[in-house]
Image: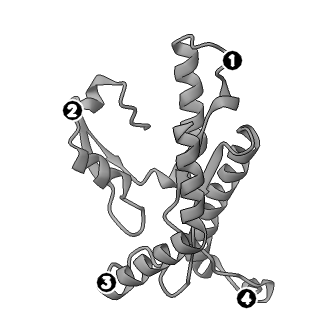
Amino acid sequence: MVLKNDRPVYLRLPIWEVCKASSSAPVYFPAHPLTLDGQTIPVIDGGVVANNPTACAIAEAVRINQARAIDSRAGIDQFLVASFGTGETVRPITAKQTQEWGALEWALPLIDVLFDGSADATDYIAQYLLAAGNYFRFQTPLDTAYDDLDNADATNLNALVGVAETYLRQTGEARLNDLAIRLKS
């Protein structure tokens, strides 16, 4: 299910429910029971389908433009897209490590590969579809010491804040300034 705000039934959803549903990552959290029009359905993290939803956003913008019969000259080459990630796991896996792996050993690494691989593929597609300089992706690599999805202790959260601040100082701030300039023009 894709929650689009142009459907009246979704306008009645409290934001806390949407947030809880969108962060119900399987294995880590239970599915969130969401009731719509008297029917309760289990919903899970949208990252399972689109960990980087940039391509979905581009497709939706194209659909809306077509539905509104907006001037075709203002097509995809005119889109300016900013995509903000939550950090990318960087856990190298060697061929030697995997030689003896079975299903159990592959379970957690496979989740990382599926989520990050999907996000990387979307990043590649967005760079290809959009005009040069019209796509801004903000995504920092996460140190393996701090990348566990279910680690919400104060030490880990403070470390993640530090990672984000370092990213902004080293790379992100200049790119954010470039984005701000583009948005003003």
Q: Name the residue under label 3.
A: 153
Which quarter of the image is occupied by the N terminus? Answer: top left
Q: Name the residue under label 4.
A: 97
Contact (CB < 8 A) between labels 3 and 2?
A: no
Give whichever of discs 2 and 4 has the lower sequence position: 2
Q: Is residue 113 shown above or below 84? A: below
Task: Compute the Cα span from label 1 to label 4.
Answer: 52 Å
Nearer the observer, disc 2 or disc 4? Answer: 2
Give whichever of discs 1 and 4 has the lower sequence position: 1
Task: Compute the Cα span from label 3 to label 1.
Answer: 50 Å
Label 1 secondary element? loop
Q: Please name whichever residue, 174 or 35, is drawn nearer the observer in this view of the structure.
A: 174
Give the image location of residue 23, x and y in percent.
37, 58
- Colour scheme employed for the rendering of this structure: one colour
Residue at the far top: name it: 69
Task: Compute the Cα span from label 4 to label 3.
Answer: 30 Å
Q: Mark 1 points at which residue?
A: 73
Amino acid at circle 4: Gln
Q: Please name whichever residue, 178 or 68, is drawn nearer the observer in this view of the structure.
A: 178
Amino acid at circle 2: Arg
Crowd rating for badge 4 (residues with CA inside 10 Å; few <14, some 14–19, many 20+): few
Using residue 83 as the reference point, say whether residue 72 is left or right of it. Answer: right
